[in-house]
Image (cartoon, helix red, strand yellow):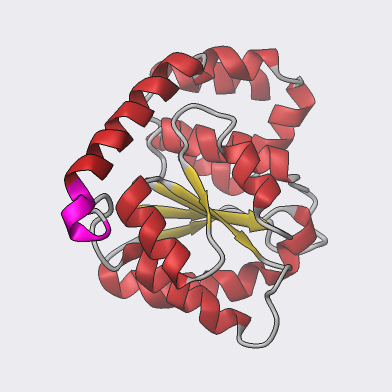
């Protein structure tokens, strides 16, 4: 599994700490972490939490990554932004129990963590425990296990509802402010991976037009 890490500007200073915790947990599991920044508060490419949603949607829809780890000060803005786009199911995760139940019950592909609110002493350990519980088992297995069948049925219903509730991403992106989208997708790491690995040719053409 390829896992993206994305930080917005208010919490960019924690990027290296989050990356270390994530890699420590998931690399022994055989997963790959791709850090899309922001890497520091001084980065030229500043990302707002709204732009996190755009970047996460493009990465997931294009098949560049399989999962997105993100957040902001409270985690709420990043979660709302991510869930504004098709192909992204983002949970708000504050602790390991949130991580485990979201993975097993809701079977999403992104989480938003509060990197300021309640972070405090031991925040780095909490991150490790969150990532352990998030990826400790294949997602969608149900919790408690006897609830697996109705929970999986509800997830299929949610997917069907979302498929009808959203425009395709290729139609959404051109409707948004061009500079907003360009700012979300202008990172060097994004450009180097997207155009070589994107599995959706229609999405690739739209992104190419926006960035040109």
199 over 14 or under it: above or below: above
Question: Residue at image x 69%, y 73%?
Answer: 118
Q: Residue at x 69, y 29 (%)?
A: 181
Q: Residue at x 53, y 83 (%)?
A: 125
**Residue 115 x %, y %:** 67, 66
Q: Position of residue 123 (x, y in %)?
A: 62, 80
Asked whether 175 falls inside the magenta stretch, the response is: no
108 to the left or right of 36: left
Residue 145 is a magenta residue: yes
- Comparing 141 with 7, the one in front is 141
Quarter residue 108 falls in? top left
Query: What x and y, as percent, mark residue 16?
Result: 62, 72
In-front residue for pair 154/211? 154
Judged left or right of residue 89, residue 106 is left
Vertical side of 113 occupied by 28: above or below: below
Rendered position, 14 above or below 158: below
Q: Which span of residues is magenta-colored?
A: 143-148
Residue positioned most to the bottom:
121
Check the picture and name the quadrant holding the C terminus: top right
How many dots with numbers? 0
Q: Is residue 75 visible?
A: yes
Q: Position of residue 167 (x, y in %)?
A: 52, 14
């Amino acid at each position: 599994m390829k896992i993206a890490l994305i930080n917005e500007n208010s919490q960019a200073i924690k990027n290296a700490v989050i990356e270390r915790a994530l890699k420590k947990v998931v690399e022994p599991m055989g997963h790959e972490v791709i850090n899309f920044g922001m890497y520091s508060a001084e980065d030229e490419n500043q990302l707002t939490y709204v732009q996190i949603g755009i970047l996460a949607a493009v990465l997931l829809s294009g098949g560049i990554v399989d999962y997105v780890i993100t957040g902001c000060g409270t985690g709420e803005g990043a979660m709302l932004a991510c869930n504004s786009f098709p192909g992204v199911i983002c949970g708000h995760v504050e602790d390991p129990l949130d991580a485990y139940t979201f993975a097993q019950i809701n079977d999403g592909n992104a989480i938003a963590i509060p990197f300021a609110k309640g972070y405090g002493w031991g925040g780095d350990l909490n991150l490790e425990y969150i990532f352990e519980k998030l990826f400790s088992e294949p997602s969608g297995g149900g919790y408690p296990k006897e609830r697996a069948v109705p929970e999986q049925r509800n997830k299929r219903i949610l997917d069907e509802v979302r498929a009808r509730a959203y425009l395709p991403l290729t139609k959404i992106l051109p409707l948004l402010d061009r500079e907003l989208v360009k700012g979300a997708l202008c990172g060097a790491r994004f450009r180097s991976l997207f155009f070589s690995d994107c599995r959706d040719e229609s999405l690739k053409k739209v992104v190419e037009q926006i960035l040109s």
